[in-house]
Image: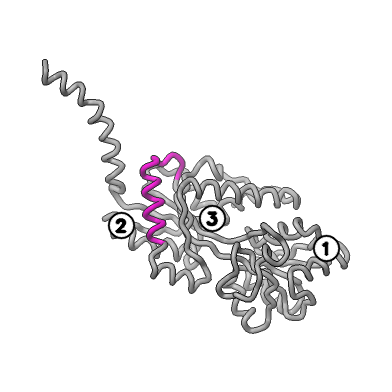
Amino acid sequence: MLITRRIALAAPALLAALPARAQGAFPTRPVRIIVPYTPGGVSDITARLIAEPLAAQWGQPVPVENRAGADGIIGTEVVAKSAPDGQTLALVSVGHPVNAAFYRLPYDTMRDFSFATLTTRTPLVLCAGKGFGPSTAAELVAYAKANPAGHVTFAGTGGVVRLAPVLFAQRAGVEMTYVPYRGSTQAHPDLMAGRVDIMFDTVPAALGHIQSGAFKALATTGAARAPQLPDVPTLTEAFMPGYEATTWGMVIGPANIPAPVLAKLSADCGAAVMRPEIAARHAALGAEVVRSTPEETRRFVEAELEKWGDAARRAGIQPQAAG
């Protein structure tokens, strides 16, 4: 009877320890990182760079799988529908919250995901062709106000590059006309030739043209000056306090990953991306490596979703069917 009583008293503690042990053993099999974009972009490079140290730490393979299509929606949906065990992750970009402004999504941007950590941040640069009159953001706004509504044109390629000038115009109280392009390489010749006036582009994409003198850099859009363009002020310091528009990377998983597993994913992925050799590789791409807790990451996505969604609604952009 005494032995039975001791077993009965110990049972709750033993049962409580079992999930902790199971979670402490995470991962128990390969951890897949889905990149919902084509190979070669920053998200893809980040995923492949952190996969090696994570595999070494976890003692499990960490395969990276590109599942591109529909501006990242196809691969992201795969993650949303995966088991919430932390074994399937995605490395997404700013397109994750921005897509909600453009598409009717097959998942909910916040509800259907767990958020582990930010990985990178890359500012945009507001640039113009060398023949365009204004050379600063303030001069651009003055020029737009002095000319008929919509006279100033901006090139947009979708996503945050499409919405960054929209937000800029809304905060400046001016109107500008959107000229769509399939990608930066298609827009750049027209910007150089003056067929379109301005463009918000990533620093790495525009840097060569800025250095050659073909583009003028009016301002950058990060919280601090871009290391590659130290003499170019941010919009916040030059003209528009609080304006920020960046591309970024982030590790997410399906909703309801257990808190201890999510905390481990956040810590381990964050530590991996901050390794000196990985930070240096990203710096060469024009990206800053960053990390965040799950709580910080979720709050960041919520703020991005609200900011870009509001800008799109005020511009009359209606979500369309994805695909």
Front one among 48 and 298: 298
For image coordinates 31% across by 42% down, the residue present is 23
Query: Which range is magenta?
Result: 254-273
Q: Residue 5 in the image: state x and y as whole percent.
A: 16, 18
The residue that label 3 is drawn on is: 72
- Give the farthest residue toward the front: 237
The quadrant in which residue 179 appears is bottom right
In the image, is 46 to the left or to the right of 61?
Answer: right
Q: CA distance from mark 2 to mark 1?
A: 53 Å
Looking at the image, tell me whether mark 2 or mark 3 is earlier in sequence order: 2
For image coordinates 54% across by 52% down, the residue present is 73
Q: Amino acid at mark 3?
A: Gly
- Give the farthest residue toward the top: 1
User: Residues at badges 2 and 3 in contact (C-beta under 8 Å)?
Assistant: no
In the image, is 255 to the left or to the right of 188?
Answer: left
The residue that label 1 is drawn on is: 150
Which secondary structure, mark 2?
loop
Q: Amino acid at mark 1?
A: Gly
| Of the two numbered discs 3 and 1 in the rendering, the one whose residue sits closer to the viewer | 1
Q: Residue 224 in the image: state x and y as whole percent.
A: 59, 65
Looking at the image, tell me whether mark 2 or mark 1 is earlier in sequence order: 2
Res 61 label: 2
Q: Residue 17 in the image: state x and y as whole percent.
A: 26, 34
Which secondary structure, mark 3?
helix
